[in-house]
Amino acid sequence: MATQPAQPSDGSIDLSVLVVSYQTKEWTLEALRSLLAETSSTRIEVLVWDNASSDGSAEAIAAEFPNLTLFAQGENLGFGAANNALAERARGRRLLLLNPDTVVLDGAVDALWDFAERTPAARLWGGRTRFADGQLNPSSCWGAPTPWSALCLGLGLARAFPRSAWWHPEGLGPWQRDSEREVPIVSGCFLMIDRDLWRELDGFHPDFFMYGEDADLCLRARAHGARPRITPEATIVHYGGASERGVRAGKMVRLFTAKAQLFRKFWGPVAARFGLWTLDLWVAVRRIGFGLARWVGKGSPESRRVWKEIGSQKRAWHDAWRATEPYRKPTTASPQPVEEVPRES
């Protein structure tokens, strides 16, 4: 089913806001309320795709927001495919991907639009995210994965030193997302992109069902000459993982699968195989660690069970790795290097 959006008085639209929901009724309603309340100067249309939720999401959205465009389907297409479907119907000059587990603060969408107007060469933009308690949620942007960063994640060094640019390079070091700068990857929870660039890239790649779509999109965008940028002036709350609560093992398997695909797609054959090995190492280190904790009478039995379950499904990311085709970069664009992040131990 679908309802039609209200039209701007002159028939023009600046920005198409795309929201994909799955089992997040209350979160999605809160996100839409905040989006409409906090967006005033940017002419927007809002398109919502519900991925076959069984919690009454579609009915609740249609009842409260009859002027938004809503698509309620009988199957779960995944995050990427659903956004692709919405983008095909979008009419704005730019697209904004907005997660349903977010709250727009202090005119954040207007601020992000203004930032894009000031920095059009970036072609892809993001803001700053916070947790519900107001603390910084650093996942609004990331560094590009490398064999070194994969090894640090596998060994647990990134978790032990989360603010170190040396031990956790994908976390971009101690930077608090409090200044404007170029970044390799903008999170898909709050990502604005020129619609023309989206079309050049053919949107999200169909290989990615959940996780990894935004990293893949941003890395391909850079190969097309984009220079993604972040501004602290556009701040939202991002709760994170609202549709995945209580399924940690499944979430990690999907995350590992996406990482394996990214390694295979963007790294050379030797590095890609090394990256695949670091995912197995990630599981082995946790299982050994929780096993030792049990031996000394500490640690969580549930954590040991979860990591055992994850390890039992490693064929999923190995199969995905083998099935992924290496990316062939276009020859028409030469993106500038990403700004260096000072390394700190």
Image (cartoon, grey):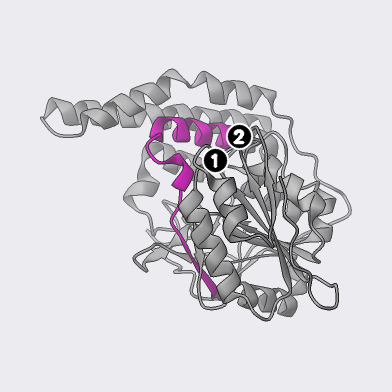
Q: Quadrant of residue 132?
A: bottom left
Q: On screen, 211 above or below 172?
A: above
Is any atom of residue 331 visible in this view?
yes
Q: Of callouts 2 and 1, which one flags the residue occurring earlier in the amino acid sequence? A: 1
Residue 290 falls left or right of residue 207: left
Residue 297 falls left or right of residue 49: left
Can you name the residue that lies furthest to the right here? Answer: 332
Q: Where is residue 139 drawn, in percent x and y? A: 49, 57
Which span of residues is magenta-colored?
Answer: 234-260
Which of 194 and 71 lies nearest the eye of the viewer?
71
Q: On screen, 189 above or below 176?
A: above
Instruction: Determine the secondary structure under disc 2.
Output: helix
According to the picture, the residue beneath numbered tag 1 turns out to be 147
Which of 2 and 131 lies nearest the eye of the viewer?
2
Give the residue type that dot 2 points to. Answer: Ala
Which disc, if any, is residue 313? Answer: none
Q: Is residue 145 magenta?
A: no
Pick the quarter of the image with the N terminus: top right
Q: Are marks 2 and 1 in contact (CB under 8 Å)?
A: yes
